[in-house]
Image (spheres, grey):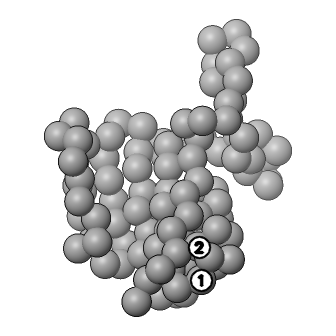
Amino acid sequence: GAGCVSSSGSYEQFFEQDGKRYHHILNPETGYPVDNGLVGVTIVSDSGLLSDALSTACFVLGIEKGSALAAEYGCTAIFVTADKKIYIEGDADIVEITDASYTYEN
């Protein structure tokens, strides 16, 4: 079962300078905001602590590596890209897309 949901995203906490948007989730290797096309990652898990940690980690890692990490912990991961595509690792049946401008890519 899954009872905890955590999301990390670049859509709320950010600032703009010289026409470029900088959000608050940083790549630990560069010190700059992660720039991998993702705007949000949601993790569904039995553990709130795990879902919170994994949502940020999977955002930083990107879809491919983030999906592998979520699968390793038996969690469902929902990745949303800037071009309105949704990728799901795990139980896709728990997700209902209600905005027709988004497309499910799995």
Residue contact at pointers 2 and 1, CB within 8 angstroms:
yes
Task: Tell which residue pokes out farthest to the left in this image.
Answer: 100
Secondary element under disc 2, as helix, strand or loop, is helix
Kindly identify which numbered label has been placed on residue 47.
1
**Foreground residue, 27 or 70?**
70
Please tell me which residue is depicted at 35% across the width and 36% down the height of the picture.
Answer: 83
- Residue 2 position by quadrant: bottom left
Please tell me which residue is depicted at 41% across the width and 45% down the height of the picture.
Answer: 81
Please tell me which residue is depicted at 68% across the width and 30% down the height of the picture.
Answer: 14
Determine crowd level at label 2: few under 14, some 14-19, many 20+ residues with C-alpha closer than 10 A. many
Q: Amino acid at mark 2?
A: Ser
Left or right placement of residue 44 versus residue 84 in this view: right
Q: Position of residue 9 (x, y in %)?
A: 57, 47
Q: Position of residue 29 (x, y in %)?
A: 79, 54
Vertical order, 46 against 55 (above or below): below
Q: Position of residue 77 (x, y in %)?
A: 44, 69
Q: Locate the N terminus by quadrant.
A: bottom left
Alpha carbons under labels 2 and 1: distance apart: 6 Å
Task: Tell which residue pokes out farthest to the top in this image.
Answer: 18
Vertical order, 54 against 73 (above or below): above
Secondary element under disc 1, as helix, strand or loop, is loop
Q: Locate the C terminus by quadrant.
A: bottom left
Vertical order, 20 against 26 (above or below): above
Q: Position of residue 23 (x, y in %)?
A: 67, 35
Determine crowd level at label 1: few under 14, some 14-19, many 20+ residues with C-alpha closer than 10 A. some
Please tell me which residue is depicted at 59% across the width and 40% down the height of the picture.
Answer: 10
Q: Amino acid at mark 1?
A: Ser
Kindly identify which numbered label has been placed on residue 51.
2
